[in-house]
Image (cartoon, rainbow, N blue to C red):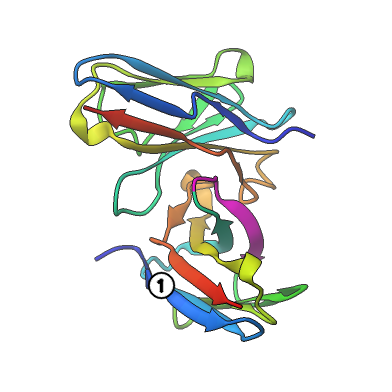
């Protein structure tokens, strides 16, 4: 079983809709949760970074962490065609493995005009 | 401010040859990471430098891979000899310090093809 599970999609939504993405994980040591956006043939770009449980909002993006369920989500409001990309969740623990990211496989999102 | 840069962007080599990938982190970033994505799989951690020291190299697949970060600035990742299964995209990332370790900024990657 993978430490981080993420549905690869593709997830197709019409422009203006809410995009809902999620990851589940098995390692209870994860404390830091990141969302990256990756356009084709580019490197991952950091979107959101949260520590422990709770919600965080930044513009059109909202990240949620539910540590009791080992489940994290990213919501994109008022989606635009420019949001079409692969979205990656990443997680890390404290202690000796600090900075070592465990990635999900990524979800491909297509926003249609 | 310049981001993380990687060179080359693409490399095609034959099995048994040697390839060296280079990463230049964001200026002033103490932490440098190497990751790899092989076809159809998730991005996987290879190793982590803090300045010139290896903090964690638990993800290095075998002793054909050698990473260095002389002087704590740029880093190189050498694969010698390359095997078919080494094909993939190699990403480098950097972050400022331990407090900011989870705000990693990624380079565009080096796409390695071993024939």
* Residue designated by label 1: A10
Q: Is residue A9 above or below residue B53?
A: below
Answer with left or right where residue B110 lies relative to residue A62: left
The mark tally for this picture is 1
Which residue is nearer to you in this view: B24 or A67?
Answer: B24
Q: Is residue B77 above or below residue A5?
A: above
Say which chain tag 1 marks. A
Task: Inspect the magenta stretch and tell me whether residue A50 lies in it.
Answer: yes
Q: Residue at x 49, y 24 (%)?
A: B8
Displayed quadrant of residue B88: top left
Q: Considering the numbered disc 1 on the image, is that residue within a helix, a strand or a loop?
A: loop
Q: Residue at x 48, y 63 (%)?
A: A30
Image coordinates for residue B36, horizontal then vertical, percent: 39, 40
Task: Please give the range of residues in magenta.
Answer: A41-51
Displayed quadrant of residue B25: top right
Residue count near mark 1 (Cα–Cα under 10 Å), binned few <14, some 14–19, many ≥20 = few
Q: Is residue A67 above or below residue A44?
A: below
């Amino acid at each position: 079983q993978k430490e981080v599970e993420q549905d690869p999609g593709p997830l197709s939504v019409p422009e203006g809709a809410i995009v809902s993405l999620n990851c589940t994980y098995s390692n209870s040591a994860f404390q830091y949760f990141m969302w990256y956006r990756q356009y084709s043939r580019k490197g991952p770009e950091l979107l959101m970074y949260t520590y422990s449980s709770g919600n965080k909002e930044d513009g059109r993006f909202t990240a949620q962490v539910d540590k009791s369920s080992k489940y994290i989500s990213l919501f994109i409001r008022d989606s635009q065609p420019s949001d079409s990309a692969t979205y990656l969740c990443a997680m890390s623990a404290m202690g000796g493995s600090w900075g070592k990211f465990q990635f999900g496989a990524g979800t491909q999102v297509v926003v249609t005009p | 401010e310049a981001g993380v840069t990687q060179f080359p962007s693409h490399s095609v080599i034959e099995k048994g040859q040697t390839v060296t990938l280079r990463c230049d982190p964001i200026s002033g970033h103490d932490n440098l990471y190497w990751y790899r994505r092989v076809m159809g799989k998730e991005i996987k951690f290879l190793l982590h430098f803090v300045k010139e020291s290896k903090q964690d190299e638990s993800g290095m697949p075998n002793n054909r891979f050698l990473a260095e970060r002389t002087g704590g600035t740029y880093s190189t990742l050498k694969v010698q000899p390359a095997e078919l299964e080494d094909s993939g995209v190699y990403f480098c990332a950097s972050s400022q310090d331990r407090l900011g370790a989870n705000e990693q900024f990624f380079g565009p990657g080096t796409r390695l093809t071993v024939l």
